[in-house]
Image: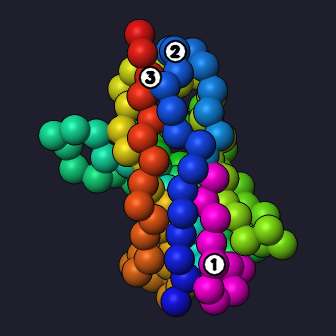
Amino acid sequence: QVQLVESGGGLVQAGGSLRLSCAASGRTFSSYVVGWFRQAPGKEREFVARISRSGASTLYADSVKGRFTISRDNAKNTGYLQMNRLKPEDTAVYYCAADGTGTLRYAYWGQGTQVTVSS
């Protein structure tokens, strides 16, 4: 198993930046594909980005492509989501998740961190 704790959320003006972190403990972090998801009030949870075990491969939702960057540091057991040019519609609770099977079934989730972007 792996335990995940997100941090780095907060209140930022439109156009600003935030970097979210996802600290992992438990099993070897490098064994997991890491994904970021978000859920805005009244909306379903949606995929934001994911990164392969080695970090060599990434995938982004169209809504964040070119603005967000996912990365990881396996030596530090930490994943990151750099968010630039934030928009009010990026306001949501952001979650990191870990997939140990490579089948896009994320068995482990953090508690979430709130990101609020003011206009």
**Secondary structure category for the residue under label 2:** strand
**Measured Cα–Cα span from mark 2 to mark 3:** 5 Å
Amino acid at the residue labelled 1: Ser
Q: Earlier in the sequence, mark 1 or mark 2?
A: 2
**Measured Cα–Cα span from mark 1 to mark 3:** 30 Å
Q: Residue at x 51, y 15 (%)?
A: 13
Q: Quadrant of residue 51?
A: bottom right
Residue 45 vertical placement versus 110 (above, below): above
What percent of the width, then of the height, locates residue 116?
Answer: 42, 28
Question: On residue 117, which mark appears?
Answer: 3
Q: Which residue is under mark 1?
A: 25
In this view, the residue farthest toward the left is 42
| Callout count | 3
Q: Residues within 10 Å of mark 1 (few under 14, many from 20)?
A: few
Q: Quadrant of residue 68?
A: top right
Q: Residues within 10 Å of mark 3 (few under 14, many from 20)?
A: many
Question: On residue 13, which mark appears?
Answer: 2
**Secondary structure category for the residue under label 1:** strand
What percent of the width, then of the height, locates residue 24?
Answer: 62, 72
The answer to whether the residue labelled 2 contacts the one labelled 3, judged by CB atoms less than 8 Å apart, is yes
Q: Earlier in the sequence, mark 2 or mark 3?
A: 2
Q: Residue at x 70, y 64 (%)?
A: 78
Front disc: 1 or 3 = 1
